[in-house]
Amino acid sequence: NAGVTQTPKFRVLKTGQSMTLLCAQDMNHEYMYWYRQDPGMGLRLIHYSVGEGTTAKGEVPDGYNVSRLKKQNFLLGLESAAPSQTSVYFCASTHRPHEGGREQFFGPGTRLTVL
Amino acid sequence: SQQGEEDPQALSIQEGENATMNCSYKTSINNLQWYRQNSGRGLVHLILIRSNEREKHSGRLRVTLDTSKKSSSLLITASRAADTASYFCATVGSNAGGTSYGKLTFGQGTILTVHP
């Protein structure tokens, strides 16, 4: 199993450009998440999905859109990139959490620089 | 905003010594998890402790949870150079009215350096 994969690994954008980050998982997980990590900080949740066709906002959703058309894929879009969106983006997935909670499985990250 | 604080922000020790990292959080939780991140890599899950548990062990890892103080600690015993990484605590909130959907709220992390 590949686990959680992310493409691309690196990207440089100019302000105002758009792009889509792709996350794919082969573990048949229902739940998927997008986080961003800024220097010296922990991860912050951007958007998440609890199943195919559903998405919801996290802590820092502004400037991002997401789609979950297939269970195994979760796309993160930047319509008009801004320098403040320079960050490392991580995707994660998990099975539907039961009462005791479940661990999340993380992808390797996408390093995005917006000039 | 970040759920809590981690202490210390950086820790430097010699191989064989124990490393203790602390995490505090602000709101009621369902569970607390610890993750490890090697430089430039994704996060790897280490251990999960539920709100009704006080201590949990996994190999050289020991995690404690004190819900009255809203704090947790991670102890790594007999550290190795390969333990050098950033360590994050993350909480899943409790939600009496529904579900938190497993959303993680992370601390800022502790950078651990283990010298050979």
Image (cartoon, coloured by chain):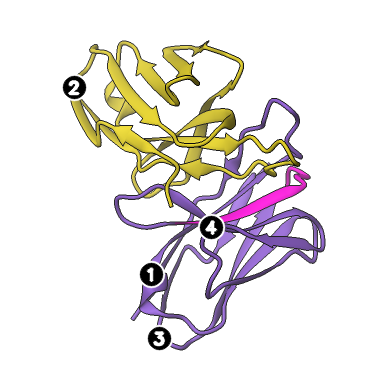
Same subunit under labels 1 and 4?
Answer: yes
Cα distance, mark 4 to mark 3? 23 Å
Residue A32 is inside the magenta segment: yes
Crowd band around label 4 with a 10 angstrom C-alpha radius: few (<14), some (14–19), many (20+): some
Query: Which residue is rendered at x = 46% and y = 17% of the image?
Result: B66
Same subunit under labels 3 and 1?
Answer: yes
Name the subunit of mark 1.
A
Q: Is residue A69 left or right of residue B11?
A: right
Crowd band around label 2 with a 10 angstrom C-alpha radius: few (<14), some (14–19), many (20+): some
Q: What span is colored magenta in the figure?
A: A26-36
Query: Which residue is rendered at x = 32% and y = 27% of the image?
Result: B82
Please name the residue that numbered disc 3 is placed on: A15
Image: A103 above or below B41:
above
Please name the residue that numbered disc 4 is placed on: A59
Tag 4 or tag 1, which sits nearer the N-term?
4
Q: Is residue B100 left or right of residue B28?
A: right
Q: Amino acid at mark 1?
A: Thr
Q: Is residue B70 left or right of residue A67?
A: left
Same subunit under labels 4 and 3?
Answer: yes
Please name the residue that numbered disc 2 is placed on: B13
* SS state under label 2: strand
Taking the image as drawn, is residue B116 in sight? no
Please name the residue that numbered disc 1 is placed on: A86
Taking the image as drawn, is residue B43 in sight? yes
